[in-house]
Every structure is written in C-alpha cells, then in structure tokens.
C-alpha cells in the first residue's frame, strides 16, 4: 500500500526485508517481528505517511503486548521426550504405563526401534509431565524398570 505502483520501490523493499530476515542471526520469531514492524513504520514515515506509521505502530504494538501477556505460543515447560533402552526380552508395550501415569499427565509412544543387532529396543515417548514432579525420582523409577540401560529425558521446543 505504501509503495503504490512503483515497481522499483516494491522490489527494493522486498530486498530490504529479505536482507533483514535472512541475513540476521537466527533468533526468536518475536524478535524478527519487531524488526519487520520497525521497518514498516520507518518506511511509512520516510514516504511521508506519518498517520499510517502511527497506525501501524499502535496496532502492532498493542497486538504484541496482548500476545506476550496471554502467553500465546509460548513453549510448554513440562513437555519432554523420554528415550528408554530396554532388553528385547522385556514386554515393552505396557511395561512403563504405571510409571508414566504417575508422573505424566499424558504420554504417547512415538517410536520403537531396535539397536545392537536387535538385542535392545529403544522406545521414544512424548510426555507432558505433571507440575512439581521430581524428575530425578521419575528417572530412577524408569531406570529400575529397564535394568539400568540408557535413559534420556530431554525438553522439547528449545
């Protein structure tokens, strides 16, 4: 809208936005949004549309404050990936259900694969842990159940 029918201005503007977006260090999408909004306000101001610049700044700032305070799209601190290695002789289909029910509000088996020429099975679970639960206690219970084989509990969304 600000560039109008000026094709050269439109292409130079697209180039400027591309440089900012793809040449800057990878960051949070929120940071990139701020940069792009500032560019839009600067473009409107530079082209002699101060009212448009004020409207863009006001609307976008209000939207960003509302999204920030509401926690929209913020990562979940309780989401984890649990990777358990078990012996192939263990019935892994329901072996960990009781432990997962005690420590997680939801759990889902997302992958099963074999390793060590089929003698071990690696189970990957997506978990949503209960708030306030003790992760060390949880890992110790799983470790006891899988016979001290490898266990990994990692955060998702980092």
Image: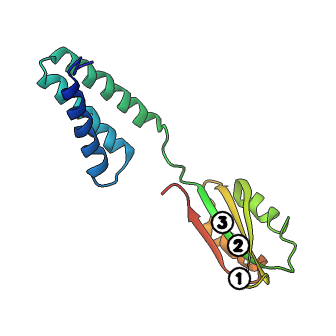
Mark 2 and mark 1 in contact? Answer it, CB < 8 Å: yes
**Viewer-closest of 29 and 70:** 29
Mark 2 and mark 3 in contact? Answer it, CB < 8 Å: yes
Lower sequence index among marks 2 and 1: 2
Calculate the distance from the C-alpha at mark 2 to the C-alpha at mark 1.
8 Å
Q: Secondary structure at mark 1?
A: loop
Q: Secondary structure at mark 2?
A: strand
Number of residues whose C-alpha sits closer than 10 Å to that of mark 1, classed few (under 14), some (14–19) or many (20 or more): some
The residue that appears at 25% across and 45% down in the rendered structure is 19
**Viewer-closest of 8 and 93:** 8
Q: Position of residue 130 (x, y in %)?
A: 65, 54
Calculate the distance from the C-alpha at mark 1 to the C-alpha at mark 3.
13 Å
The residue that appears at 67% across and 57% down in the rendered structure is 127
Number of residues whose C-alpha sits closer than 10 Å to that of mark 2, classed few (under 14), some (14–19) or many (20 or more): many
Q: Position of residue 134 (x, y in %)?
A: 62, 65
Q: Position of residue 16 (x, y in %)?
A: 22, 39
Q: Which residue is mark 2?
A: 84
Is 46 positioned to the left or the right of 139 in the image?
left
Mark 1 and mark 3 in contact? Answer it, CB < 8 Å: no
User: Tag on residue 82?
Assistant: 3
Is 90 positioned to the left or the right of 147 in the image?
right
Number of residues whose C-alpha sits closer than 10 Å to that of mark 3, classed few (under 14), some (14–19) or many (20 or more): many
- Position of residue 157 relative to residue 57, above or below, is below
Q: Which residue is mark 1?
A: 149
- Position of residue 53 relative to residue 113, above or below, is above
Q: Position of residue 97 (x, y in %)?
A: 81, 62
Calculate the distance from the C-alpha at mark 2 to the C-alpha at mark 3.
6 Å
The residue that appears at 12% across and 18% down in the rendered structure is 48
Q: Quadrant of residue 124?
A: bottom right
């Amino acid at each position: 809208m600000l560039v109008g029918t000026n094709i050269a201005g439109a292409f130079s503007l697209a180039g400027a936005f591309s440089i900012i977006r793809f040449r800057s260090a990878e960051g949070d999408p929120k940071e990139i949004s701020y940069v792009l909004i500032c560019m839009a306000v600067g473009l409107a101001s530079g082209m002699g549309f101060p009212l448009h610049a004020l409207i863009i700044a006001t609307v976008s700032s209000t939207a960003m404050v509302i999204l920030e305070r509401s926690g929209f799209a913020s990562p979940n601190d309780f989401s984890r990936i649990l990777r358990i290695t078990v012996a192939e002789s263990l019935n892994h289909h329901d072996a960990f259900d009781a432990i997962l029910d005690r420590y997680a509000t939801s759990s889902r088996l997302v992958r099963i694969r074999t390793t060590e020429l089929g003698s071990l099975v690696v189970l990957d679970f997506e978990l949503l842990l209960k708030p306030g639960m003790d992760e060390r206690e949880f890992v110790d219970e799983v470790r006891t159940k899988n016979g001290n084989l490898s266990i990994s509990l990692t955060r998702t969304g980092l």
